[in-house]
Image (spheres, rainbow, N blue to C red):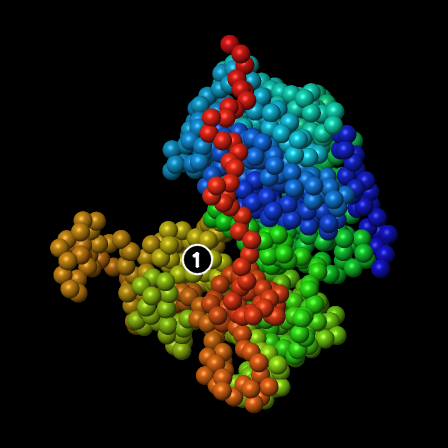
Amino acid sequence: MARDPKYDILFDKVKIGPKVSPNRFFQTSHCAGVGSERPGTQAMFRGTKAEGGWGVVFTEFCSIHPESDEFPYTSARLWDEGDVRNLRPMCDEIHKHGGLSGVQLWYGGIHSPRLESREVSRSASCLPSNLLPARTLYAAECDEDDIKAVINMYVLAAKRAQDAGFDLLEVTAGDSTFPVQFLERRYNKRTDRYGGSLENRARVYIEIMTALKKACGDTSAITTRYEIDTLQGPHGLEAKDEGIRFVELMHKEGVCDLWAVKIGDYEEWGEDAGTSRFRKSGWMLPFVKEAKSVVGSTPVVVNGRYTSPDDMVAVIRAGIADIIGAARPSIADPFLPKKIEDGRPEDIRECIGCNQCVSKFNQSGLLNCTQNATAMEEYRRGWHPERFSRAKDPCSVLVVGGGPAGMECARVLGERGYDVHLREAEAELGGHLRNVIRYPRMNEWGRVTTYRQLQLSKMKNVEVHLGVGKMTADDILAYGADKVVIATGSHWATDGLGAEGHGTLPGCDASLPNCLTPEQILAGKPIPGERVVVLDGDGHFTGVSMAELAADLGKKVTLVTNMSDPAEYSQFTMEVQNNKRMLHEKGVDILRNHWVESYQDGKLTLFYLYRHGSALIDPEVGRMPRHESTAVTVLDVDAVILVTSRVPNHELFAVLKQRRGEWEANGLQGVYKVGDCNAPRQISDAVFDGHRLGREFDSPHPQYPLPWIRERQLWGAETVPALGDSRPAVEPAT
Ligand code: SF4
């Protein structure tokens, strides 16, 4: 099908310095955890996006020198020839599909952890990092030779980037990097010509861009990513003040071929990568709209988790930006542009704004995606997001349970040509997501279901049966399917079972009126009284959502957690600050590092996890080998909401296994389990589980994953650099 002409504007070519982007789709730099260390994964992950129509595809942030070492996090690197060799395949893959490749040149200054290189970073002033204060991170204050040295590092890295094949060389002045450490008053305490006035503080940033323009600008586009508002008020850069005045200063110099404009500094990264719980698509526009009027015909990129082509067109027609930047929408659907071009935008797998992707990077892991199970698996498992191998031996498959894992498994099996029946007990697909999307702020997560529902409905070889009630083992044996996939999900513990002590909680029993699980609340069980405690031993979104839900009902809420922070996982999804702001706004009290001794007669007795003494005493059977404390905190409570742990619904699978002897007589060849009924996990893991089983359904033992390609140095292989090699000088000659 041809694309709708109203979207033609999205496919206009855009000139970026000496380069031309084939369209207005631009994958801005985003973390993935691959860097230069996993060249195959990097190449195929980014290359697949170019294949899917993204006109420009960037690396993650790319360290220009060992002084700016992000380890234990994984950045790309352009430190030496070895990195050039490992990033070149990415450029080749992008070029193969007609895209432009971009690299984000990063020098972190005081925020570089440097746990691998142990070298000293440099910055405007010698200050401790406000991002990683507990790590005793300082950078050395630059003298003018140091400034020239760092500028040289940018130039040398840019030349290596050209050698690797990169088309766009982007200086990042996002996330409080070196240029911003000079630009922002709070980082720059200098009194020389690089400190004081805005013109002085802007000098380093402009000198870096000028040096790159001179060294590489004839053949490469020299671009920047710029945080126009750090969201710190007058303490940082403000869009209406120095934020826009800097754009004027730099634009006058004519050294920038494209502006990728964002908001939020490193501390407020979660406002740049805003989650759908707190930010709806396009939230940055009020801040970035000024930039275009200043820079004239120089292209401006705006991000904002755009997944709707209509919204994208509106932004461009309004003259706010020329190019639609995207990180997460390009992860969730690498083929988003192609689907618009092919006239099937309804097939776009829209990002849900959950930030699972970046949460994995923030744990020093590899990115994964709730919506797109193939992200990062393109090379190591050979998975393409839009292509599926045909089933070697097509057969009929019954999938029991229409939650995330069941839906995804049925979708993949359907794409592969199996004859699939997906049977869901309830009247709607979604599994536990049916509840989750009714928590406050969570409605965008419903896209996990709606995308799969539509795709399943398009496949003639897939039947979806809703509202069929719970299937028994007898039902399944009599069903007549060749193979069965059990995807029956999980439920919240009704007795307080959780990670803390791995035991149930005395007096906590959700069969009582004053004890509730999230499922019961969503099913309409009333929360009695005024004083409500949410017991959060889960640490993700459910505990804070229940607290918000109860507070919105007018309850006086206390969130009790065994962790050091409310919704501790949100430090990884970067919602931690906004979770705290929200809880504060709603008047929710927080008790950290506490757990439950008992809940009796409206008294919730809590203990501090670290109440016993720090010294060890001689061991004795039946006693804690510390000076024991019996100190407790007792709260008068009308209701307790149990968000302690989830319990797998695995009974059906267990019974079917027990009745293995009856399989053959019923024509049943295999029974498998996926998702939470195997082990409760995050939704991204459940989707992955279902996807993997579908992809490997005709392997010898489908329940167990096939090996994948592991990218690491094999002993005896060449190292680059080798011991004794020299490093190009960056310091000016003295
Ligand atoms: Fe979007 Fe969530 Fe996927 Fe990240 S993990 S790209 S936020 S759907």
**Residue 207, located in which quarter of the rendered image?**
top right
Residue 80, above or below 360: above
Where is residue 631 drawn, in percent x and y? Answer: 22, 57
Q: Secondary structure at mark 1?
A: loop
Where is residue 182 drawn, in percent x and y? Answer: 54, 24
Residue beneath label 1, please? 539
Numbered marks: total: 1
Q: Is residue 340 left or right of residue 534?
A: right
Q: Residue furthest top?
A: 734
Residue 216 visible in the current orientation: yes
Residue 373, above or below 76: below
Q: Is residue 695 left or right of residue 577?
A: right
Residue 531, above or below 97: below
For the point 43% across and 61% down, the residue is 538
Q: Is mark 1 within 8 Å of ligand 1?
A: no
At label 1, counting other C-alpha atoms closer than 10 Å, the crowd grade (few under 14, some 14-19, many 20 or more) is many
For the point 42% across and 31% down, the residue is 118
Q: Which corner quadrant holds the N terminus?
A: bottom right
For the point 65% across and 79% down, the residue is 396
Q: Nearer the viewer, residue 677 or 156?
A: 156
For the point 67% across and 30% down, the residue is 162
Which kind of residue does numbered mark 1 sit on? Gly
Where is residue 163 drawn, in percent x and y? Answer: 66, 31
Where is residue 369 drawn, in percent x and y? Answer: 58, 55
**Residue 180, located in which quarter of the rendered image?**
top right
Residue 400 visible in the current orientation: no
Q: Nearer the viewer, residue 3 or 195?
A: 3
